[in-house]
Structures are given as structure tokens and as C-alpha cells.
Amino acid sequence: MSKWETLKSIALAGMIVIGFVAQSKTAHAETLQTLTVAGGCFWCVEADFEKVRGVKEAVSGFTGGTVANPTYKQVTSGGTGHYEAVQITFDADVVSRRALLDLFLRSVDPTDAGGQFCDRGESYRTAIFTSGSAEERTAQAAKAKAAADLGQTIVTPILAASEFYPADEYHQDYYKGRQLVITRFGPKRQASAYTAYREACGRDARVKELWGSDAPFVNS
């Protein structure tokens, strides 16, 4: 084989490798999907779902309202119609949408229409947001199964997805943050403040009371 032919063979082999890598990345990207849910305090939902194998990212934010790019204060003050929500990006080859919905419904109090635990008001209500009929059917099936397992009416609505607005950086990964903050428990690092808040709010106690051994994050 001539030097020129050798170079052509090497170049062709390189192009084939690049093609396989690009195809692999594209295929992987196609398995990444998003699920948006509202479960009361978005710090808690984010903390729970970032533990789940196959979840790539969980982002705290707001959705379902009428004001563009709202602030945390606007949403929690009421009147914008937004929910505190979390947008979960997951690898559908590792964990299914249905599995995540089953986990979600068992990590909240889906019988409470007025908020969640110590957090009351419209921004703290539960909800599942869907895009298209297939996602809606999956959510309806998960909701029906949760109602049957619990033996109670599930009031968590299934709503059409709308614009999701990420909260400011202060609220992202709050549960493991190191920033010093002033709380009713005194000065604490964010991670410690989060733990104290979650316990005081009674989230895990109520979820365990409702779901018992089926509560995925309380018993993990």
C-alpha cells in the first residue's frame, strides 16, 4: 500500500469513529426527557429527585401562572397563579416517566388541596404538568394507582405544561448549599437550614404517616 493510500485509510477510519461517536451522542440526547411537578417547597422536591438513578438534573422554578419571569417573592405572595415547581431532566433509558411519577406522588401529600405540610397557599399546591396525550395518559395512570394504593382521593391535578421559569441561583441546590443564612433557628449554612426547615415543617412525618413503607425518600 502506498503512503497516499495509507493516509486515506487512516482518514477514513477516523471519519468512521467520529461518525459513531456523534451518532451515540445524538441517540443519548434523544433519551433525555423532562418532567415538571409541583410538590410544595421546591428545595425538598429537588433534593429528593436528585437522589434518583437516571435523573440528570432537577431545577427549582415556577410554572402555571400568568406573570412572565416572576420573582420568588411575587409567587409566594400569591396572585400570579404560579406553582413552586421542579423540572426534572432524566434519562428514559434508565428511569421511566411513570416510575418518577410513582415516586413523586408518594413523596407528597396528594390529598391536600391547600398547600403542602406547613407551607400553605396556591404556590405550594401539588400538580403534575404534561405535554401531549401520551404524557397525560401516563400521569392519569400513575394518579389512579396512587389513589388505589392509598384508598383516598388524590386531589393533585394534571395540567397542561406551560412556561417554566427557573428560580434565581440562591434557590438552586439549596439543600446542599454552603452560604450562611439567617433563619428562625439562628445563623446556619444553607444545608443545615434546609434540614432544620424540612423537619420543622413536618414533611417527612406526614408522608410517612400517609404512605408508610411506600414513602420512597423517607425510608431510603
Image (tube, helix red, strand yellow):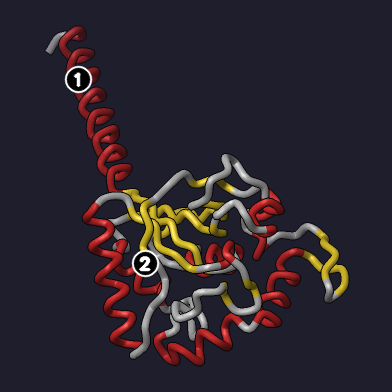
The picture places residue 14, in percent across and down from the top left corner, at: 26, 24
Judging by the rendered image, the residue that carries numbered circle 2 is 100
Disc 1 residue crowd, few under 14, some 14–19, many 20+, Cα 10 Å = few
Which sits in the foreground, 164 or 183?
164
Q: Is residue 69 above or below residue 54?
A: above
The residue depicted at 42 percent of the width and 91 percent of the height is: 213
Horizontally, residue 111 falls left or right of residue 122, namely left
The residue depicted at 61 percent of the width and 64 percent of the height is: 43
Please count the marks in the image.
Answer: 2
The picture places residue 200, in percent across and down from the top left corner, at: 70, 82
The picture places residue 90, in percent across and down from the top left corner, at: 38, 55
Judging by the rendered image, the residue that carries numbered circle 1 is 12
Which sits in the foreground, 173 or 60?
60
The residue depicted at 25 percent of the width and 64 percent of the height is: 138
The residue depicted at 36 percent of the width and 53 percent of the height is: 160
In the picture as drawn, the residue positioned furthest to the front comes out as 79
Q: Is residue 107 above or below residue 178?
A: below
Mark in the foreground, 1 or 2: 2
Q: Amino acid at mark 1?
A: Leu
Say whether disc 1 or disc 2 marks the residue closer to the N-terminus: 1
Q: Amino acid at mark 2?
A: Leu
Horizontally, residue 202 falls left or right of residue 125, namely right
